[in-house]
Amino acid sequence: MLTNFIETIQSRSDLIQQAFVEHIYLSFIALAIGIAIALPLGILIARYRKYAEPVIGVTAIFQTIPSLALFGFLVPLMGIGSNTALIALIIYALLPILRNTYTGIISVDSSITEAGRGMGMTRSQILTQIEFPLALPFIMAGIRTATVLTVGIATLATFVGAGGLGDVIYRGLQSYNNSLVLAGALPVALLAISFDLLLKWVEKKATPKGMKTN
Amino acid sequence: MIRFDQVTKKFPDGTEALKNVSLTIPTGELTAIIGPSGCGKTTLMKMINRLEIPTNGDILIDEKSIKETDQVELRRSIGYVIQRIGLLPHMTIEKNAGLVPKLKGWSDEKTQLRVRELMTTVGLEPDIYLPRYPLELSGGQQQRIGVVRALAGDPNIVLMDEPFSALDPISREQLQKELRSLQQRIQKTIVFVTHDMDEALKIADNIIVMREGEVEQIGSPDDLIHEPANDFVRDFIGQERINRQRTFAQRKIHELTSFFSQARTSEQIAEISSTDSIETAISMLEKPNVNLLAIRHKDEFVGYIDQTSLLRAVIAKEEGGNHAD
């Protein structure tokens, strides 16, 4: 079994390597765009709170669509290819980042922001010097959740022809080659776990020093 | 001098927090604003640094309308201490205390010098506390930093919104004393909102008593104790507190109602008002041709009092019986 597995990795190393790179590419682009949308949006809805519920609600609905089905919905609209996969992944990445950014900012103690206002801080100074640093641990936790989610779901990108490690798994399934399935699944799991650990460390680093003594 | 000129504040929900208030807060003194919750005292204070905007009327600092100053600049020129302290937990004490000078664009050396000086003033060793974070300090220490932060930008006016009410009684008392002695040295115009009459009487030069958006009385602690403007002020101060601050002789005749007699026991009668002090009554009874006082309350006679009944009242007081209250 193990020798079989090692042989498979050796003989299919080109395929696995390419799939691995595609997988990371898909996950990263999706996350980068997801952060670029959800972070400012989260800050915005924390300021204009009456829009918070509807905006979070919409992203939550997207989240409830099973991932395979979402890929399926998008194919008639967007065709197949990596763009379709990216859109689906971005949609999934939005909610955790958006919700955590929003929660992080609104949970900043109002006495602290009031003190800032009373001392003569401008709105943007309050955001950058008070709200953002204090919300950062929440935001990082959201990004971490989104990362693990995205790396996992990117496995399904193969069904819309966008490659990724899902390709390897799918081929293995079709040819009843358990070793090949494993050769695809294992890197996905390792990717997810290592990103999770890395971001956990970043999250800890992001916690303002004075907040740790409690 | 801070002058409120016919200031009204209506909130969107229709409540009127301030009703056409005009008053003056003198420079270099500590003025306490006091009243039951919802009386508009905090709103009144927050108008000075434009955290609340008047619906009508104007506020002038040294006869210059605060509308003419940019609100961010205005706030940087006014110290602000809030009840829940509001130190920024992610910044060291040094950064917290130096925040306003930094916003004002002071140099690092000037800021540091000023912060260290103020830290020493409030009794916190700079070398020990400056590198620490707020959560490593006790409540009392944190609020001392709150005061340092408010004073760091060298403002002429400092606003304090129930700054000591969240502290334990011992820290509170200590900070009250420190504020009092600090104020005597620095002579800032301090506006201090509180709901604690003991606190106001202890620390303030002037007290503004408010109720339902209106000013009931403005005066020194002595004025309030000796000449409460109306029943509300008297009740708010509390008879017990008034008594504590006054000698027996300074009490009013009407506080001795239970010792009044209805029988007219002499022809040598003088008339006294129920709001006169016991001291006055005694000096009247010392006159050779007077040995009974007829007490007038507003326009009615409510009874008589003579030396014997006064003596009984003194004995009752000596025995700790406060039924005259």
Image: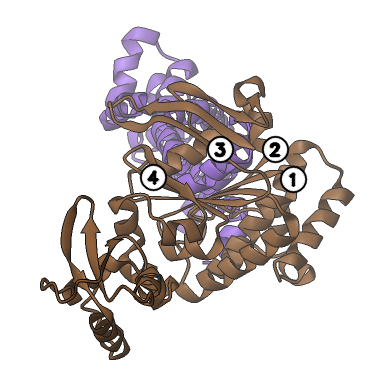
Q: Position of residue A73 (x, y in %)?
A: 29, 16
Q: Which chain is purple?
A: A
Say if mark 4 contacts mark 1, CB within 8 Å: no
Tag 4 and tag 2 share a subunit: yes
The residue positioned 42% from the left and 25% from the top of the image is A48
Q: Which mark is residue B24?
A: 3
Say if mark 1 contacts mark 3, CB within 8 Å: no
User: Residue lying furthest left in this view?
Assistant: B263
Nearer the observer: mark 1 or 3; the answer is 3
Q: Which chain is brown?
A: B
**A58 lies left or right of B182:** left
Seen from the viewer's position, the closer of residues B200 and A118 is B200
Q: Distance between the Cα atoms at labels 2 and 3? A: 19 Å
Q: Distance between the Cα atoms at labels 4 and 2? A: 27 Å
Q: Is residue A146 visible?
A: no
Say if mark 1 contacts mark 2, CB within 8 Å: yes
Q: Distance between the Cα atoms at labels 1 and 2? A: 7 Å
Q: Position of residue B253 (x, y in %)?
A: 29, 68
**B223 lies left or right of B69:** left
Give, as a three-letter code, the residue at label 3. Thr
Query: Who comes first in sequence, dot 4 or dot 2?
Result: 2
Check disc 1: other Cα within 10 Å, few if <14, some if 14-19, many if 20+.
many
